[in-house]
Amino acid sequence: MKTKFIFITGGVLSSLGKGLAAASIGALLEARGLKVTFQKLDPYINVDPGTMNPFQHGEVFVTDDGAETDLDLGHYERYTHAELGQKNNYTSGRIYDSVIKKERRGDYLGGTVQVIPHITDEIKQAILQLEGDADIAIVEIGGTVGDIEGLPFLEAIRQLRGDLGKENTLYIHVTYVPFIKAAGELKTKPTQHSVKELRSIGIQPDILLCRAEGPLSQGIKAKIALFCDVKEDCVISARDVECIYEVPLRFHEEGLDDRIVQYLNMWTRAPILTKWKELMVKINEPHHKVKIAMVGKYVNLKESYKSLNEALFHGGVANRSEVEIDFLNSEELTGDALRKRLEACHGILVPGGFGTRGIPGKIEAIQFAREHKIPFLGICLGMQLAVIEIARNVANIRNADSTEFTPSTPEPVIYLMKEWFDYRSNRVEVRDENTDLGGTMRLGAYPCRLKDGTIAKAAYGVDEIFERHRHRYEFNNAYREVLEKAGLIYSGLSPDGELVEIVELKDHPWFLGCQFHPEFKSRPLNPHPLFVSFIHAALTNKMGVQGEA
Ligand code: GLN
C-alpha cells in the first residue's frame, strides 16, 4: 500500500484542538473508504508520557501493545478504526535517546553528530515506519510553530516533501482568528504571522484550519488566502462547536475532505457520514439525564481523565441519556460533606490512580455505594479499593490494605505478585519491591475470561475479552475464599485463572470493579459495554421501581 502523508502543525497558541482536528480528518477520510493511521510527534524531552503528572499533561493513553502515549492518540482511536501503538507516538526524548545510543555504539563512525541531519533523519525514519500501514498517515506535530524545541520536527517534515513528492504530502496548519470586541471584528493578523513563521522554516501550508468563535465570512477567507498564499477554498472555518463529535460533519460542510483528496490526487467515493449524523441526533436529543459522582484525585482537570469522561458520555448516548459528572476530590471531601454530594448522584465511579493521597475518601465512597445499593464502577485502583473496603467492612479483616499504601500491612489483599504468567510476553514474569518501577507495570491488552450469570458477561455478551491494563498491584489469591464468602464474585479471570480481572458483589444491583481500563476502548460509534451497562443501571436507580425518568 502506498501511503500518503498529511502533516498537521499548529500556530498562534496551544489548545486549538489540533488533535481533534487530526482525528476528525481521519474520520472523514475513513468515511470515504480510505484506511488511515496516525502519529503524534511531541517536542518535549521525556522519553514517553508514562512518568508525566496527569495534572500537567493530561491523561496517559494506553494502547493495545502497551505503549504509554499522549492523550491525542485517544482522540485518533475514538474517531477512527486505526489501531495505534508504540510507533504512533514519538517524543524528542525518544528520538534523542535512540541517536545517543547509536553514537555510543559507534554507528556514526566518528562523525560529528548533529541536529541536522542526524536528529532529523531519525525523525524521518520514525515517520516513514508508517509507510504501508494505511492509505493516509496523519502526522501531528505537538506544540506551536515558533517553539524552539519543535524545530527539528518541522525541518524533518519540510524535507519529506522533497523526498516523497508533492502529491504524497500535504501540510495543514491549524491557526486562530480571534474576535476583538472593541473593534467588533475578526482579526487575521495572528494567522498571518503564524504562517509567516512557518514559511520562514520552509513550509508553505496547503490548507489552513482557522479556529474562531463563529464562521469566517468570505471576505475574511479571501484576506487570509491572499496574505498566506493559500487558495481561498483552502481557508477552512473551524468554528467552536458544542460537541466534539460534530467536528467531522462541520469540516465536511466546509469542503475539507474534498480539498484533501484533491491535493493528494486521490479518487475516492463521497463520504458516507450516516453514522456520524445519527450519533449527533442521539447526542442532541437525549431522553434522560443521570448524575455520576467521580471520586478521584486529579478531579480538577478534565484532561487528566479524558478517556473516562468520553466513555461515560458514550455510555450515556447509548442510553439516550445526558451524563452529568460531579467531580469529587477525595482529598478535600470526606464524612458528611462527601455523603451529601454522593446522595445527589445516581451512580458512583472510582477511577484509576497512583499513590496514597485521597484513599480514605474513595473507600468511604465505595462503602456508601455498597450499603445504599447505588451502582458502582471501580476502575483499576477503584477495583482494588473496592476489594479493600469489602475485606475491611464485610469480611472483618480490619487491617486489609494494599502494599502500595502500607508496604508492611499484615493483610495484603492487594499486593505485588511475585510471579505470574504474562500473556503478552508469553513467559513467567518475576518482580518484587526492588524491581525498577517502570519495568513492573502490567501494560497493554490482556485476555480475560468471563463467568456466566454475571453483570460482566451480560454486558459483553462474549466469553473472552481483551482489555488494557496499566498497574503494578494485583488481587492477592490468598484472600479469594474468604472474600467470596463475604459476597465477592470473580466474574473475570485471566485464562490460567490466576489473575483476578473483574469483581462483582452479591445482592447488589450493579457493583463492578475491573483491574483494567475499559475507557481506553470506548468509541462514540461503538460505546463500551461496561459503560453502557453502568449508565443503564444508574438510570434504573434514578427511575426507581416506577420506571419513570
Ligand atoms: N496504583 C495501582 C497499581 O499500580 C492502580 C493503578 C491504576 O489505577 N491505573 O496497581
Image (cartoon, rainbow, N blue to C red):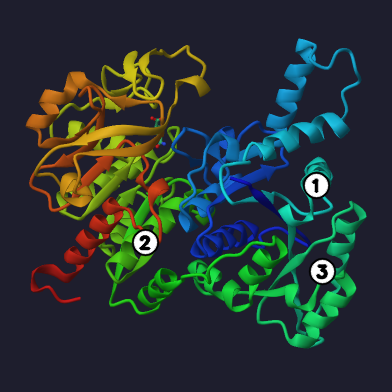
- Say above or below: 244 vs 214: above
Asked if 439 appears above or below 336 in the picture, the reply is: above
Location of residue 34 in the rendering, given as x and y in whole percent from the top left corner: 53, 57
Residue with the mark numbered 2? 314
Disc assigned to residue 482: none
Residue marked by disc 3: 191
Rendering coords of residue 395 (x, y %): 13, 31
Residue behind mark 1? 154
Q: Are marks 3 and 2 in contact (CB under 8 Å)?
A: no
Q: Secondary structure at mark 1?
A: helix
| Position of residue 222 in the picture relative to residue 404 (left or right) | right
Query: N-terminal of the two: label 3 or label 2?
Result: 3
Q: Quadrant of residue 464?
A: top left
Q: In this rendering, would 109 be left or right of 294?
A: right
Location of residue 413 (image quadrant): top left
Look at 60% across and 74% down and name the residue there.
240
Residue depth check, mark 3 versus mark 1: number of the one nearer the observer? 1
Q: Residue at x 43, y 45 (%)?
A: 331
